[in-house]
Every structure is written in structure tokens, then in C-alpha cells.
Image (cartoon, rainbow, N blue to C red):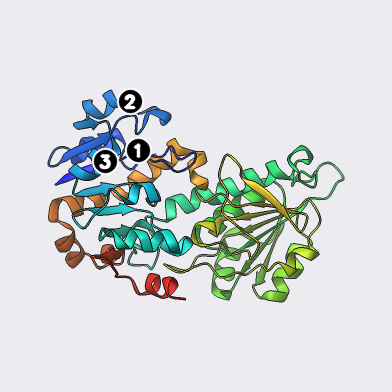
Amino acid sequence: MIIGVPKEIKNNECRVGLTPKSVNVLSKNHKIYVQKDAGKAIGFTDQDYQDNGAEILGAASDIYEGSELIVKVKEPLPEENEFLSSKNTLFTYLHLAGNKENARNLIATGVTGVAYETVTADDGSLPLLAPMSKIAGQISLVVGQYFLLKPNKGLGTLLGAIENVSAREVSVVGAGVAGTEAIKKGLSSGAHVNVLDISQDKLDELQHSFGTDNISYILSNTDSISEAISRSDLVIGSVYVVGKEAPKVITKDMLKVMNPGSVLVDISIDQGGCIETSRPTTHDDPIFIEEEVVHYCVTNMPGAVPLTASLALNQATLPYIEKIADLGLNQAIKQDEHLANGLNMANGEVKHDSVNTALNT
């Protein structure tokens, strides 16, 4: 199979679909095209790719035109959609519910789209979403503390206790993979962490892991969220529903109980956001202020650490890429029901029930 790796063009997106190490594995049985300078920003030179069996092509159009399987990181932008057709299979994060207009335009190209974020595992987890969720969860505390600094528009607090000054509070709404990482980082910062989730079983599981020191476990509902965020300097929204737009669990009215200068980080923004006032931002312009609360809503948070993120992503995706390349997509999804759950679109039609529901509501 001919596999193509275009250079990512989203704002400040320096991750790469295949590392030279992954190319080395795949090139033993398949032809690999990599766009010029695709990995340059994170230290992967064109020579590195050539030494591991890739051919370097200059233009994105050549990558798309000459490849059967396109391996990316982020969803194609409108200027990339024009290169796609029914002859291509696209393997990447699609997050179709996060931008319905772009999703419909992508579907109309006829491309076969397999989304990392809807590939499943036997235990119900999402193995290709998990690495980036872990990174985003860790980053949420880093950027949250940064924007709490007064020169950065924040309230002007450190999260941890200082001598006789009490620790501040962080609330994590949604205790999945990203939320769990945020909890860990929140506790390590010295903050008191409020964990809110709709599953009592999940809260019990987390209590078994984290104990009861400096942490509160709260069953999530409108009242409990409002009460928790009223006490919090930093609120992290990390709600995810497979294939669907994230539910708006924090409303605009709730922001009125928050302290001016407190910070909201919406990890769910690539699925439309779980905070009513959220709107997509970029690493170049990451925040805005509404109701006197700082909002951080960058849609590619792991892009802030592109080398780490590329290495982690490739470790997870390579076995699936090998399976698709070796067997062809049709046979691969017949043999692997979990990979089949990644199929979002083909021949101009939506193939995933949750995505279909999201795009038609």
C-alpha cells in the first residue's frame, strides 16, 4: 500500500502522523511518501525519513494524489479537503461533531475516514484517543496555573499552600482519561481538588486510587457543579461522549458565581466544548474573557508538546496502521470490530451512528 504523510497546517500544529521510527517499520512492506519538512519542527529531518525508507515529496497535493492511505494527526482543514477523494482512506483525529460545517464538506469529498477517537478496545476504552487525552489533562494544569498569574489576566494565585496560606481549589468536571490526569497534576500542585462525575462507580474507583487527602468526590449535577466552581480558581472541563458533541455541563449563568480572574480550561473543545461560553482558540491566541472569567479553549492542546505527543500517538496508532496497510481497510475492519468502530465516513455517507446523530441534531 502507498501511505502518505502530509505536513500538518493547523495553527501551531507541529505533530506528525508518522515518526521516522514508524516509517522504518512500515517501509519494509509498503511505500511511504512524507511531505517535505513534515517533522522538521520537532527534530525529524527529511534525511531521517529517507534513511528509514520514505520518499520526500514537496507539495501536499502530491502526497494526497499519490497515496492510498493518508496518515495525519488533525482533521483536514478546508484547503486540504480539496485534495481528498473516494480513492483515499484518511486515518486521523476527525472530531466531526466539533465543526459540523467542515465535517459535511469533508464527507462530501467521498473520502473514507477512520477516526482515531472512535476506535475502541475490549474494555470499552478508546486506545487512540487516550494518549492525547492524557497529555491534554496534564497540560490543563500547566496552562491553568499560567493564566491564573495576574500579568496573564488571572486572579493572581498559586494553587498550592504557602506557609500559613491555605491551598486553593481546582474542580475537574468529567473524570475520564483527561480528567484523571488533571486530578493527578492538581494534587501534585498542592491544590485541593474537587472531582465531579456522573458515575458514582467512577468516583468510588478514583477514591480507591487517590484516597481522601486534599480531594473531594462529588456526584455531578447542575447544583453540585455550580457550588464547586464557585469555590474554585481553576475549573477543567473534560467531558467526552464518543462521536457526539460534548454536553454543555457548565452554563453561562454558572459563571456568575465564579471569582473574577478565575480560569476555565475546556479540554472538550475539539468536540464542541462542555462549557456554554467556550469557543475555539489557538496557541497563538489561546484565551478570551467572558463574565470576568478567563477561558482557555485551544482545540489542539497536545500540539503544545508536539514531540512528546507524536511519539505517544505513534506508539498507539502504528499497529492499526500496519493492519490497514497489510490487509486493506475492508479486510482489516472485518477482522477487527474495534477498528471498525473507527470508520466514520465512506462514499459520501456517515458510517458511525453516534457521529450521524451528532451531525443531524
In the image, 336: left or right of 185? left
Check disc 1 and report the residue beneath it.
Answer: 7
- For badge 2, the amino acid type reads Thr
The answer to whether residue 73 of the structure is visible from this angle is no
In the image, 354: left or right of 177? left
Mark 1 to mark 3: distance in Å?
11 Å
Q: Nearer the viewer, mark 2 or mark 3?
A: 3
Q: Quadrant of residue 93?
A: bottom left
- The label on residue 157 is none
Q: Position of residue 246 (x, y in %)?
A: 53, 67
Q: Quadrant of residue 179?
A: bottom right
In the image, 186: left or right of 119? right
Q: Quadrant of residue 327?
A: bottom left
- For badge 1, the amino acid type reads Lys
Q: Nearer the viewer, mark 1 or mark 2?
A: 1
Near-viewer residue (31 or 282): 282
- The label on residue 61 is 3
- Residue furthest right as drawn: 164
Kindly identify the residue that appears in the image at 49 percent across and 68 percent down: 245
Q: Position of residue 225 (x, y in %)?
A: 70, 69
Kindly identify the residue that appears in the image at 64 percent across and 65 percent down: 276
Please rate how many residues cluster around mark 2, counting C-alpha atoms within 10 Å: few if below 14, some from 14 to 19, many from 20: some
- Dot 2 and dot 3 residues touching (CB under 8 Å): no
Q: Earlier in the sequence, mark 2 or mark 3?
A: 2
Kindly identify the residue that appears in the image at 28 percent across and 48 percent down: 83
Name above or below for residue 47 compared with residue 174: above
